[in-house]
Amino acid sequence: MPLKAILFDLDNTLLLYSEKQFYHDYIAGLYIHFRDVLSPDEFYDRMMSATRVMVDNDGSQTNLALFLETFSSGLNESGEQLMQRFNSYYENEFQRFEKLMIPVTGVAELFASLKRKGLKTVIATNPMFPMTVQKLKLSWAGLDGFEMTLITSVENSCFCKPNILYYESICQKVEVAPEDCLMVGNDALNDMIASRLGMNTYLATDGEQLSLELSHSLAAKDETDLPVPDFSGLLTDLPKLINKLTRANG
Ligand SMILES: [Mg+2]
């Protein structure tokens, strides 16, 4: 395989934090912006159902359009008005989560070396958050200003992980065949599923203790069916593997 692109998951791959704590605080903080129109339970239920529908997006519209359509169903407010509530939170308050975040050592150096090798770099983070949030998290990871080939976000994506079509659409956008990609991520299902498309996979173990068990429990009903990663290890072990793979490029 000529290695041409490296895809990276973000949460608990490039940036470590307790997802349980984050989602607890995130939902609580976001609710404040909806308390004049929804009860806490109604808000939570709408968030959950709109997220579930978004995970099953069939590609006919963006994740954002589908999320807003589902979330606003039966409400007296347009998707645009709702979006203003979300944006106000993301733009003014999301910054506070920086204190939960632990950057992984060596990330900036890793990306600089990928650039030197002429490899395409994709931030293949589950596209459920807006680009403003993805870029903020990347800056917390030490990648402020690094020019990525593609960052997936709720606005530019029409599929979610673990749908294989999410990975296929990335290949189309960056014009690289799946066989020429390496997907790096911490999630045994959401990230390693890329192997079903023919991508090479690297299970990153830095964030092992901090990730949500959500996708594991989804997969638990058929644990034997989990994709087997081609490689696994810490992010600091990745440059060695990439050197080996790019040497094989000739
Ligand atoms: Mg992750």
Image (cartoon, rainbow, N blue to C red):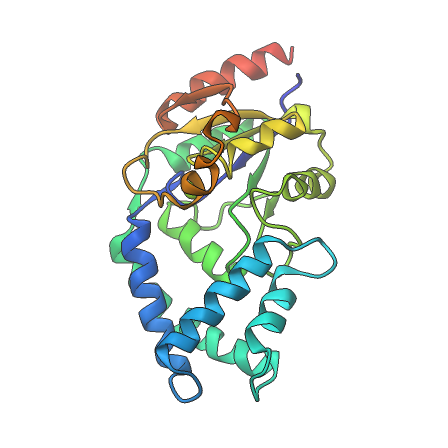
Percent position of residue 67, x then y: 58, 66
Location of the C terminus by quadrant is: top right
Q: Position of residue 184 (x, y in %)?
A: 49, 31
Quarter-of-image position of residue 15: top left
- Where in the figure is residue 130, as x and y percent of width and height? 53, 62
Tell me where residue 30 sits by quadrant: bottom left
228 over 93 or under it: above or below: above
Relative vertical location of residue 230 with respect to residue 223 in this rendering, above or below: above
Where's ligand 1: which quadrant? top left
Tally of numbered tags = 0
Q: Position of residue 110 (x, y in %)?
A: 43, 31
User: Residue at horizontal 30%, vertical 53%?
Assistant: 20
Residue, far left: 99
Q: In front here: 143 or 89?
A: 89
Question: What residue is drawn where x is 54% and y is 76%?
Answer: 83
For image coordinates 66% across by 16% down, the residue present is 1
